[in-house]
Amino acid sequence: MNDSRVVVITGAARGIGRATAVAFAAAGYRVAGADIAGPASSAMDYEPATAEDLAQTGRLVAEAGGEWLPVVFDQRDKDAVRDGFAQVADRFGGVDVVFANAGVQGFAPLLEMSDELWHDQIDINLTGTANVLRVAAPLLVERGGGRIIVTSSTQGQHGTLDGSGYSASKWGLIGLMKSAALELGRYGITVNAVIPGLINTALTRHEDRYAQIIRSGGNEPAGELERDERTAAAAQRRKLPLGVPWVEPEDVAPLVVFLASDEARMVSGTSFAATGGDSANITA
């Protein structure tokens, strides 16, 4: 049992963060779920997570037998991140595992991209994750070791049509992860990344994402949500060896729990993917 271990999960209000929070609770961890729980960027074409979303994660964690602490912060604000982790340490006595998962995604060609769209993806996904690691790592050192897992993406392993900001941020996370693994190993801390494919979450289930998939195949979207969703889903089924349009968050969560486990004590500086087979198309 891991009932003495504490995990902090960012982006816990829904999607991969929520599924992983529940998986950790079922594995006996005490769970702190952090989220901005509100609008993060007006440049994104999907509904932001809410306080009620975060509360629902808490209810599911409790149903799975876990002790829960919600924490709200914007990870672009390092002082807010520090305050959030202090709440966790005060409540649970320390931190053993950090799953730095929070992020945003938007699409626009470089020639049309707004400064806001670029900066929000870099500032939230890359700099915000670095803030989490910089705040959390000393707590893990105090604990005598621990685990850090970050969420990158297949788009952090290849170029992305109309998605340069997201691709740059997620590719940057691979470099951050590998560098942190080199630096923190001496303290008994492993650092790894999970690589989700196209996941069935609010981040991907919207018109801009469907349009990007369609354009990547050399076609133009119809501009009708339901029609473009069907077209994009069909394209994904053809592309992915396992024949699914997108992967469920619950298919990613076990990788994170494994990377946090004692069994993964010699795994550091690398990536684990759940992509429906899309990994076979990637050489990076």
Image: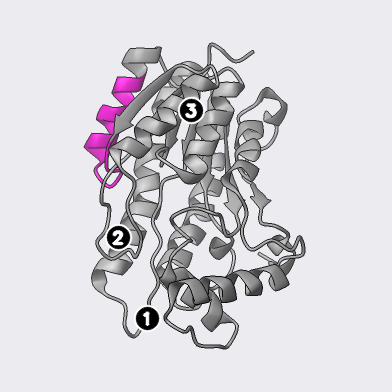
Q: Between tags 1 and 3, which lies in front?
A: 3
Q: Looking at the picture, does residue 18 appear above or below residue 6?
A: below
Farthest front residue? 226
Label 1 secondary element? loop
Percent from the top left, x then y, of residue 232? 57, 73
Q: Which residue is mark 3?
A: 60
Q: Which residue is mark 2?
A: 120
Label located before the other in sequence (3 or 2): 3
The residue lying toward the viewer, choosing from 200 and 86, is: 200
The reply to whether callout 3 and callout 2 are in contact (CB within 8 Å) is: no
Q: Earlier in the sequence, mark 2 or mark 1?
A: 1
| Residue at (52% x, 70% y) in the render | 229
Q: Which residues are magenta?
A: 73-88
The numbered dot on residue 179 is none
Dots 2, 1 in contact, CB < 8 A:
no
Does the stretch in magenta take in 194?
A: no
Q: Secondary structure at mark 2?
A: helix
At x 48%, y 40%, the residue is 17
- Amino acid at circle 1: Leu
Residue type of the residue flagged with mark 3: Leu
Badge 3 density bin: few <14, some 14–19, many ≥20, Cα 10 Å: some
State the residue position of label 1.
110
Q: Quadrant of the C terminus?
A: bottom right
Image spot of residue 56 (x, y percent)? 40, 32
Scheme of colours in the image: one colour
Q: Is residue 254 above or below residue 43?
A: above
For the residues labelled 1 and 3, the Cα–Cα distance comes to: 40 Å
Main secondary structure type of the part rendered in magenta: helix
In which quarter of the view is residue 164 placed? bottom left
Pointer 1 with pointer 3, Cβ within 8 A: no
Near mark 1 (Cα within 10 A), the count class, few <14, some 14-19 or many ≥20, is: few
